[in-house]
C-alpha cells in the first residue's frame, strides 16, 4: 500500500506551482527520491527536531513542509549540529522532504486565500503583483460526430477556463476539404480523391504553460491522422499572481471588535497591534508570515489595517506615518493553518485518484515558539 513520491509532487505542483515561488526561495523536493514509495505522509509548517522525531516514531515516509529545511547552500552536514542531525536522521530513515513556501503564499487557494476566506473578505485580489500568466487560443477542425469527444478531452486537460467558468469553448459549423496522398491512411475518404466533410471549428483558450498537455489530449481524442489546428498567442493575460491579499469586510468593524475577530478566527490568545484604537476597519490587507514590507503598498491601496507577522519597531512607525493600523498576529499565527490546508488538499486528491496511502496527517504537536507572560 503506497504511492510514488513523484505522484505526490505532481499533486502539490497543481496546488502551488513551483514556478510561482520567489527567485530567492528553495522549494520542491529537498531530500529523497521521486521514485520512492510513500505510504504515510506528514504535513508541517516547520521541520524541527520534534517533527522529525515524530515522523520517525510513527513511520512516516514523507514530510511536506512550508519552510524549507535547506534554504541556503550547505557547506557542511555536521551531525553534532541541529540541522545536520535532522538531515542525517531523515536520510537514514528514508523520509522524503518537500517544501511549499512562497509558491503556497502566492498560489490561488494557498495560505493568503485561506486567510481571506476566514475573514470573509470580498473583492479579493493580490496585494502585490509578481507575475501574470500568458494565454494561448486553440482552433481545431473536427468532424461533426467527434466534436463532443474532442471538446471534453481538451477541457479535461485544462483548456477553457475563464475566471470562475470552466469548459468555455466556441464551435461553428463549416465544410473541410482535403485530398489524402499516397501513403496515407485516411479516417474519412480515399487516397488521391478530394473529400469534403462537415466539420466544426472548435475554439478555446488556455494558459500557455499547458499548451503541450492540451495538444497531447487533442491528438489522442481526434480521429484524424493529420490534425489541422492553429495556436494564437493572445495579448490578454490571466491570474495576476502575488504575495498577500486585500479585500473588503462585509460589514465595517471597530478596531476593538476586529482584534477579537482576528484572535478568534486565527485561534490566538494574543496579538500585537499598532494604530488608532477607535479606527473603523473596512478594507483589510493580509500577508502571511513576514509582510511588513507591504505596509506602504497596503496604505496606498486604501487598506485600514494589515494583518501580518514579524513586525519591527521602525516598520510600526512607518505604519503610523501612513495612517494604517497593523495587527501582528505572528509568523506562526498567520501560517500554521497551512498544514491542515495542504493535508486536506492531499486527502481529497488521494481519494479521487485512489492513491493507496495509509495516512495523511498534519502536524498537531508544534506551537508558536513565542510565549507571553
Image (cartoon, rainbow, N blue to C red):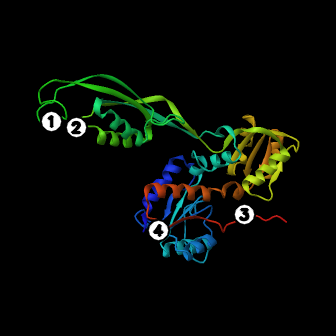
In which quadrant of the rendered view does residue 160 lie? top left
Q: Tell which circle, 1 or 4, labels the residue nearer the N-terminal end.
A: 4
**Image height check: is 192 above or below 27?**
above
Q: Nearer the viewer, residue 258 or 70?
A: 258
| Mark 3–mark 4 CB contact (< 8 Å) | no
Residue that badge 1 annotates: 184
Q: CA distance from mark 3 to mark 4?
A: 29 Å
User: Where does label 3 land, which residue?
Assistant: 368
Disc nearer the start of the sequence (2/3)? 2
Crowdedness of circle 3 by 10 Å Cα count: few (<14), some, many (20+)? few
Rendered location of residue 366, percent (x, y): 67, 67
Upstream in sequence: badge 3 or badge 1 = 1
Q: Residue at x 31, y 31 (%)?
A: 229
Q: CA distance from mark 3 to mark 1?
A: 68 Å
Can residue 282 be seen?
A: no
Q: Secondary structure at mark 3?
A: loop
Identify whether 121 is placed above or below 196. below
The reply to whether discs 1 and 2 touch (Cβ–Cβ < 8 Å) is yes
Residue 34 at x, y = what percent?
42, 62
In the picture, the disc for residue 39 is 4
Q: How far apart are labels 1 and 4 at the CA level? A: 49 Å
- Mark 2 vs mark 4, CA separation in Å: 42 Å
Q: CA distance from mark 2 to mark 3?
A: 60 Å
Amino acid at each position: 500500500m503506497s504511492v510514488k513520491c513523484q505522484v505526490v509532487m505532481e499533486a502539490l505542483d497543481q496546488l502551488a506551482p513551483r514556478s510561482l515561488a520567489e527567485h530567492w526561495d528553495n522549494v520542491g523536493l529537498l531530500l529523497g527520491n521521486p521514485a520512492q514509495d510513500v505510504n504515510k505522509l506528514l504535513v508541517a509548517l516547520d521541520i524541527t527536531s520534534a517533527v522529525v522525531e515524530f515522523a520517525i516514531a510513527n513511520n512516516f515516509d514523507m514530510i511536506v513542509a512550508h519552510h524549507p529545511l535547506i534554504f541556503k547552500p550547505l557547506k557542511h552536514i555536521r551531525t553534532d549540529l541541529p540541522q545536520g542531525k535532522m538531515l542525517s536522521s531523515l536520510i537514514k530513515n528514508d523520509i522524503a522532504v518537500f517544501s511549499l513556501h512562497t509558491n503556497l503564499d502566492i498560489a490561488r487557494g494557498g495560505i493568503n486565500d485561506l486567510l481571506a476566506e476566514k475573514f470573509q473578505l470580498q473583492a479579493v485580489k493580490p496585494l502585490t503583483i509578481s507575475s501574470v500568466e500568458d494565454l494561448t487560443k486553440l482552433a481545431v477542425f473536427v468532424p461533426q460526430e467527434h466534436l463532443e469527444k474532442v471538446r471534453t478531452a481538451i477541457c479535461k486537460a485544462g483548456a477553457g477556463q475563464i475566471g470562475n467558468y470552466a469548459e468555455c469553448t466556441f464551435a461553428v459549423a463549416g465544410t473541410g476539404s482535403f485530398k489524402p496522398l499516397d501513403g496515407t491512411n485516411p479516417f474519412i475518404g480515399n487516397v488521391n480523391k478530394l473529400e469534403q466533410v462537415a466539420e466544426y471549428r472548435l475554439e478555446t483558450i488556455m494558459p500557455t504553460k499547458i499548451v503541450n498537455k492540451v495538444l497531447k489530449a487533442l491528438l489522442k481524442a481526434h480521429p484524424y491522422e493529420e490534425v489541422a489546428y492553429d495556436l494564437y498567442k493572445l495579448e490578454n493575460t490571466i491570474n495576476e499572481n502575488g504575495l498577500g491579499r486585500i479585500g473588503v469586510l462585509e460589514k465595517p468593524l471597530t478596531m476593538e471588535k476586529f482584534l477579537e475577530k482576528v484572535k478568534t478566527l486565527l485561534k490566538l490568545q494574543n496579538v500585537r497591534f499598532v494604530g488608532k484604537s477607535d479606527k473603523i476597519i473596512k478594507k483589510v490587507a493580509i500577508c502571511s508570515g513576514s509582510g511588513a514590507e507591504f505596509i506602504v503598498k497596503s496604505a496606498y491601496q486604501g487598506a485600514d489595517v494589515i494583518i501580518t507577522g514579524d513586525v519591527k519597531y521602525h516598520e510600526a512607525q512607518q505604519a503610523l506615518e501612513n495612517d494604517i493600523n497593523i495587527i501582528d498576529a505572528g509568523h506562526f499565527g498567520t501560517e500554521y493553518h497551512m498544514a491542515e490546508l495542504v493535508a486536506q488538499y492531499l486527502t481529497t486528491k488521494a481519494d479521487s485518484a485512489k492513491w493507496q496511502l495509509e495516512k495523511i496527517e498534519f502536524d498537531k504537536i508544534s506551537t508558536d515558539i513565542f510565549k507571553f507572560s
